[in-house]
Image (cartoon, rainbow, N blue to C red):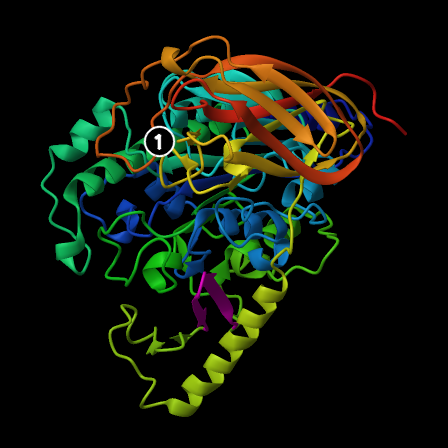
């Protein structure tokens, strides 16, 4: 029975029959947050792109409020950490995208924790990118359900292996479509209770893969809008990225239609934004820079918020907003407590959303990637080398630092203060938890390993979704900094490939005096899985790996160095390695 009909029936019985019922508690609004990966501000029709069709996102913008200037971090993992915690990502321990730099400190309170504590069912469907091993895993950060992948990117978007609450599962069809399917199932399953549904899509991040119908539609158009320096544009990437964005739009439409089908439109706050600027040089409203840059094109992204009957429709707010504002804003809109362990840096923007005439407040927002650093106010943006008036020069073409030297010097001092704050929060060491009481299986992919020796490399320049190769010296080895949370006996499995010529390598997993030895006695040397790329890739391809049960190892409680060494290799290579898995046999010690 639809909720609207239930309400009408209740009113009828109360009025006609004079029945006395206890007052019904007001239902808390659902929250649906859609986060895209590498979609630029200019990748929406409503922002003026004449070569992309995004009817569902355009309609969402017309039915809600969109921010004229909404800022995120220059790259993926920091934006996600800021959204999840309401804090600058540097304060959460997230300052990069790989090799542990993307892990979010376990002491942080997440937006999922906040809504879960308020009685919400919480689910995440897509790319996580803030830590892998439990409790860094989404299930340990407030999400009742997780379907997707924890890595920074994935090798294949069609019929691939993902995970569901820590267990491997085979996805169906194109990944963005599949993630949408699972998010819709979650919303339907929890239609009678408030839910917080987080959908961090995997696209348009490379590899540039997209179903034929979307690709052909964009390729058949004549692209005439380009990045402001058109010599930098790579048209094949533009076509593929816009096609992936049109697929995103189609899936946003599916999510919105599901809310309508469930009669939950008026009871659901919908948020749409992106994690950084575009991942290629393409039209972006004349802004300077792209992903990984701290100028407008790298950090200014679309942000739309809709709540029918509550948030102003077809409105553009001039209030500066940012990723870390969403936690306090959504908590305020939902009427729940936003208690967090640490003070948030974000501000609740509920006032400007609920009242289109609310006063716009000036503020300063910082952006950082490696050594690049910028700040923004309502009027200016500054770097160490530049000062620009965004109200007159949104393309950042006229440098005012020499004409306004005192103002520039003052802003540069603020930048340096921020730089020192950020540096003070970089973790000195990060250990991967093993054997948590709530998760017996711990997966240690090579992307989280360190390499000893000059020969070992990843299968591509990006560790995420890669494997370790070039293991041709027995003195080289990978190792993981681990923290054994519960002492016990652990089964050891490795995922490997090995040619027939290299069968017979003897290996040992060791943590101090504790060891587990085995032998690669079976060849497994499959071909790479063909991937329908629209543009030549930089990432690894996907390939199958074989699981070898290496044996058992006793692991004592505490931190240490877990190493996988080769004792002997009869051929040229030991093996290619994707991961180690540790499975705790016995109950955790008190």
Q: Main secondary structure of the magenta part?
A: strand
Picture mark count: 1
Residue shown at 31%/34% (left/top)? 207
**Which span is picked out in magenta?**
363-377
Q: Which residue is mark 1?
A: 540
Residue 179 % position (x, y): 46, 26
Question: Is residue 461 a member of the stretch shown in magenta?
Answer: no
Whether residue 115 appears in this view of the structure is yes
Residue shown at 47%/81% (left/top)? 411
Residue 52 is drawn in which quadrant?
Answer: top left
Residue shown at 47%/21% (left/top)? 569
* Name of the residue lying farthest toward the right: 590
Of the pair 172 and 311, the residue shown nearer to us: 172
Q: Secondary structure at mark 1?
A: loop
Of the pair 189 and 454, the residue shown nearer to us: 454
**Which image quadrant: the C terminus?**
top right
Residue shown at 14%/56% (left/top)? 230
**Which image quadrant: the N terminus?**
top right
**Does 148 sit above or below residue 375?**
above
Whether residue 30 appears in this view of the structure is no
Residue 584 is drawn in which quadrant?
Answer: top right
Residue 538 % position (x, y): 30, 38
Question: Is residue 376 a member of the stretch shown in magenta?
Answer: yes
User: Image check: 418 left or right of 379?
Assistant: right
Of the pair 424 and 558, the residue shown nearer to us: 558
Tell me the crowding category of disc 1: few under 14, some 14 to 19, or many 20 or more residues within 10 angstroms, Cα based: many
Residue 229 % position (x, y): 16, 60
Residue 260 % position (x, y): 48, 28
């Amino acid at each position: 029975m639809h909720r609207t009909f239930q309400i009408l029936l209740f009113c009828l019985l109360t009025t006609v029959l004079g029945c006395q019922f206890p007052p019904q508690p007001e239902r808390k609004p659902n929250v649906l947050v859609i986060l895209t990966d590498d979609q630029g501000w200019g990748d929406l029709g409503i922002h003026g792109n004449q070569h992309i069709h995004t009817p569902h996102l355009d309609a969402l913008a017309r039915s809600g409020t969109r921010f004229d200037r909404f800022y995120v971090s220059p790259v993926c993992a920091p934006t996600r950490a800021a959204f999840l915690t309401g804090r600058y990502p540097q304060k959460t321990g997230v300052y990069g995208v790989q090799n542990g730099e993307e892990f979010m400190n376990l002491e942080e309170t997440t937006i999922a924790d906040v809504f879960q504590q308020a009685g919400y069912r919480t689910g995440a469907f897509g790319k996580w990118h803030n830590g892998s091993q439990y409790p860094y895993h989404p299930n340990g950060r407030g999400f009742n359900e997780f379907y997707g992948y924890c890595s920074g990117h994935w090798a294949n978007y069609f019929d691939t292996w993902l995970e569901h609450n820590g267990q491997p599962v085979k996805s169906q069809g194109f990944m963005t479509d599949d993630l949408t399917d699972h998010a819709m199932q979650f919303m339907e399953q929890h239609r009678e209770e408030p839910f917080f549904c987080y959908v961090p899509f995997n696209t348009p991040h490379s590899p540039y893969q997209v179903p034929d119908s979307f690709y052909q539609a964009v390729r058949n158009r004549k692209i005439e809008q380009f990045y402001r320096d058109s010599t930098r544009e790579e048209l094949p990437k533009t076509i593929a990225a816009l096609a992936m964005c049109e697929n995103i739009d189609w899936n946003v439409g599916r999510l919105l239609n599901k809310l309508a089908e469930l009669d939950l439109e008026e009871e659901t706050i919908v948020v749409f934004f992106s994690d950084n600027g575009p991942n290629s040089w393409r039209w972006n409203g004349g802004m300077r820079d792209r992903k990984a840059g701290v100028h407008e094109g790298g950090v200014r992204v679309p942000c739309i918020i809709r709540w029918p009957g509550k948030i102003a429709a077809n409105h553009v707010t001039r209030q500066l907003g940012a990723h870390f504002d969403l936690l306090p804003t959504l908590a305020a809109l939902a009427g729940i407590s936003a208690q967090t362990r640490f003070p948030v840096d974000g501000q609740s923007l509920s006032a400007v959303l609920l009242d289109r005439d609310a006063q716009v407040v000036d503020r300063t927002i910082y952006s950082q990637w490696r050594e690049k650093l910028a700040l923004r106010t309502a009027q200016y943006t500054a770097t160490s080398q530049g000062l620009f008036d965004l109200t007159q020069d949104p393309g950042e073409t006229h440098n005012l630092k020499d004409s306004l030297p005192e103002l520039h010097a003052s802003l540069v001092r603020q930048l340096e203060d921020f730089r020192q704050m950020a540096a003070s929060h970089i973790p000195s060491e990060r250990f991967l938890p093993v054997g948590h009481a709530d998760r017996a299986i711990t997966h240690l992919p090579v992307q989280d390993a360190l390499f000893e020796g000059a020969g070992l490399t990843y299968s591509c320049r990006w560790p995420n979704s890669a494997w370790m190769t070039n293991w041709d010296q027995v003195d080289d080895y990978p190792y993981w900094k681990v923290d054994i949370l519960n002492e016990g006996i652990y089964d050891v499995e490795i995922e490997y490939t090995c040619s027939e010529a290299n069968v017979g390598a003897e290996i040992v997993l060791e943590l101090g005096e504790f060891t587990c030895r085995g032998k690669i006695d079976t060849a497994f040397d499959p071909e790479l899985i063909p991937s329908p790329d629209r543009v030549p890739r930089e990432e690894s391809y996907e390939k199958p790996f074989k699981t070898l049960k290496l044996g058992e190892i006793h692991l004592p409680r505490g931190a240490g160095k877990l190493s996988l060494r080769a004792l002997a290799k009869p051929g040229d290579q030991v093996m290619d390695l994707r991961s180690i898995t540790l499975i705790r046999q016995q109950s955790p010690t008190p």
